[in-house]
Image: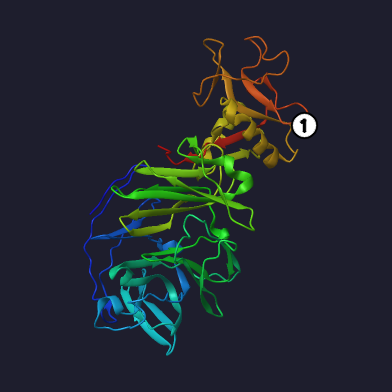
Amino acid sequence: MTETLSAGQTKEIFVDVRLELRKEVTSNKALIITSTGKITVRTTSLKLNSVQTALVLPTTKLGKEYLIPPVPQIQGTTDQVSLDVTERRPFTLFIVSAKQETKVTIEGVPTREVVLQPQQVLQVLVQQAELRAVKADQPVAVLFGHACAIRHNCTCSLLQTTLSPAKDQKLRFFIPPFLAKNKTLLLISSNESTTIKGFDPDSPLVETNGTAILYRPGLLLPLIPETDFASCYVINRIKGMQNFAVILVHKSFIDGVRIGNIPLENPDWQQLRGTEFVSTPVDLLLDKSVIWHTSHKMAVYFHGKYQAALFGNPAPIISRTADFRGCLLAPEVVHIGEVAAGWRESVKYCRDKDLQLVSLSDGHNVTHIYKEMIQVNNDSVREAWIGMRRSSQTGEWYWLSNDPVNATNWKDGEPGAVNEGQCAIMSLESGEEFGWSDQDCCKAVRPVCYRRPVLFPLG
């Protein structure tokens, strides 16, 4: 099937793909989603009162090595492991190959090697702590979980999460108090060992060179390392259920958090003891919420509850680069041309680079562009063409971009009379505050070329 989506649009796809869960098998039942543009994909599994959500990693973000987390001890599930009773079966790894034939090594006791064809799924039973890592010669995806883990009162539910590729560095994981409540365990893996420990509110920071997963009955939630913090996330709520965003940010930057176009309303910031970070839950009332920061990076989780079932996952990232104007998809470009030429030739020079002579019509944005120009200029150019000129019919000044002429920055005595200069030039000399003057359009001057940033729709 083929779908066409506009920017910010969401599409639900319903699938029924089942695997044999009682034995280790290789399956060709993989759903393949491709796109001509950037998209995020989240899976939602619903079965009776059981709910699970997980992010689907794009093939560009897959890895060749994954550390297998320790198995949490669950009464009625892991205390009497059996292949004959569903809720007592072992935890399982699902290893999914990408576009090429892939040799997979499953390190443990014993170590095994398997060859997967493109888009094949391998199911591996995890017998307690016998497996340590998954390594492959091509990128793969790895999922970890249980088909029917006991949650409470002899009730079992699906328990599933997507593992993140291993990294060769020490990582810091911060644990928001809202996510860590009764019976919370931390499943910590590293290159040397695996550890299971209870959550201590006095120690909400985990440091490891591997991964950290938060476990609560019915929920496996990978924690976001500080190195993966980002500036913009998008969350789609699940109708008929309680939906939350959990935001984690440095306490000095709480004023920059936005949901859509507005700041947070009366946030209940909770200090993470012994750290400089705070977190808060936010009720999600809209079908889609864009959560972004004007100047800094943060972590955002999607979390929810359906009856007694918990679910959640790290929120999908839209952008890692903060921008005061919104959720940045592509950064702006400020370029001072290498060639001094007339205004008309400068227009062509910029267009040949898929840019345009800069428009300085937006007073809120002008100061920011001036700062960018200082960085790219480095005091080497004294003046430059901008995208403003005088109409030969009316004598009125206009922007080449068709932006309205609102705020201006003419030097004293500028612009001159109609019969004087017809094109606008900007000073780049220090102390002149980027003042404008009118000049003969044939004067040889370098241009300031510009491309607006591309922002994700906030509504």
Nearer the observer, 363 or 16: 16
Residue 181 is situated, as x and y percent measured from the top left of the image, at 46, 60
Q: Residue furthest bottom?
A: 110
Residue 215 is situated, as x and y percent measured from the top left of the image, at 43, 67
Q: Residue furthest front?
A: 153
Which quarter of the picture shows residue 381? top right
Nearer the observer, 442 or 61: 61
Which quarter of the picture shows residue 422? top right
Classify 220 as above or below 41.
below
Classify 120 as above or below 227.
below
Crowding near the residue tagged with mark 1, few <14, some 14–19, many ≥20 C-alpha atoms within 10 Å: few
- Quadrant where the N terminus sits is bottom left
Which quarter of the picture shows residue 152? bottom left
Residue 32 is situated, as x and y percent measured from the top left of the image, at 30, 62
Residue depicted at x 48% and y 35%: 262
- Mark 1 residue element: loop
- Quadrant where the C terminus sits is top left
Residue depicted at x 36% and y 48%: 236
